[in-house]
Image (spheres, grey):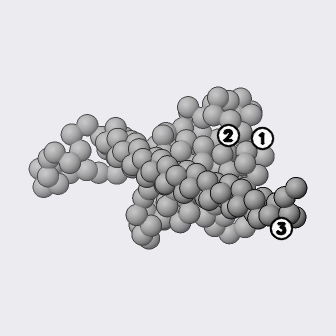
Amino acid sequence: MPSVVGLLEEHELAARRRVDELREEADRIQAELAAAEQEWQEWMIARQRVSVLLSAPTGAGIADDATSPVTASTRQKPQVPVWREGLAWSALSVDYQRILKTLADRSRLGQGPLTCQEMAARFGMEVVPTRVEALRSKAKRLVARGWLAEDAPGRFTLARGVSGPGGGS
């Protein structure tokens, strides 16, 4: 009959092996997660760049300003319709849809509102005043049109009734 101390040592050794195995697996998963997050960030940046190129007026950046003046009447801002029940997100430009999708995901996960700095970081943008202010302008426009709510200054979330991208409710 084995001793009690011997049995305890066997169980302790088995538990130590299991802890080591789980730590190795956690390290592997952590490395895989970091690689996947990096790939996701690269795709977000690529999508943002394509969106900028697709939303630019035809020939933008090809002719210099001296030969092709751009006036306020030739450059139009994307229109943001007033939100109403059943209005699809596709009525908005890609940039506005991205803001809504990010806030919808947070809402679905039970997470709170986002600031424009946090959004810029999530979108893979440089977190500099010009980028943050551009996002803030878009978010404020979405608030004014009923798509977003700003319960606390600078903290944005989806407005009541606005949910999934397929429809407005």
Secondary element type, mark 3: helix
Report the front residue among 63 and 168. Answer: 168
Residue corresponding to mark 2: 83
Q: In the rendered structure, which disc, 1 or 2, sits on the residue that comes first in sequence?
A: 2
* Marks 1 and 3 in Cβ contact (< 8 Å): no
The amino acid type found where label 3 is placed reads Val
Residue appearing at x 68%, y 35% in the figure: 164
The amino acid type found where label 2 is placed reads Trp
Crowdedness near tag 2: few (<14), some (14–19) or many (≥20) residues, C-alpha within 10 Å: many
Residue appearing at x 25%, y 37% in the figure: 58
Q: x%, y% of residue 49?
A: 34, 46
* Marks 1 and 2 in Cβ contact (< 8 Å): yes
Q: In the rendered structure, which disc, 3 or 2, sits on the residue that comes first in sequence?
A: 3
The amino acid type found where label 1 is placed reads Gly
Secondary element type, mark 1: loop
Which mark, by number, is residue 5? 3
| Residue 162 in view in this figure | yes
Question: Does residue 72 lie above or below 134 as drawn?
Answer: above
Secondary element type, mark 2: loop
Disc number lying in front (1 or 3): 3
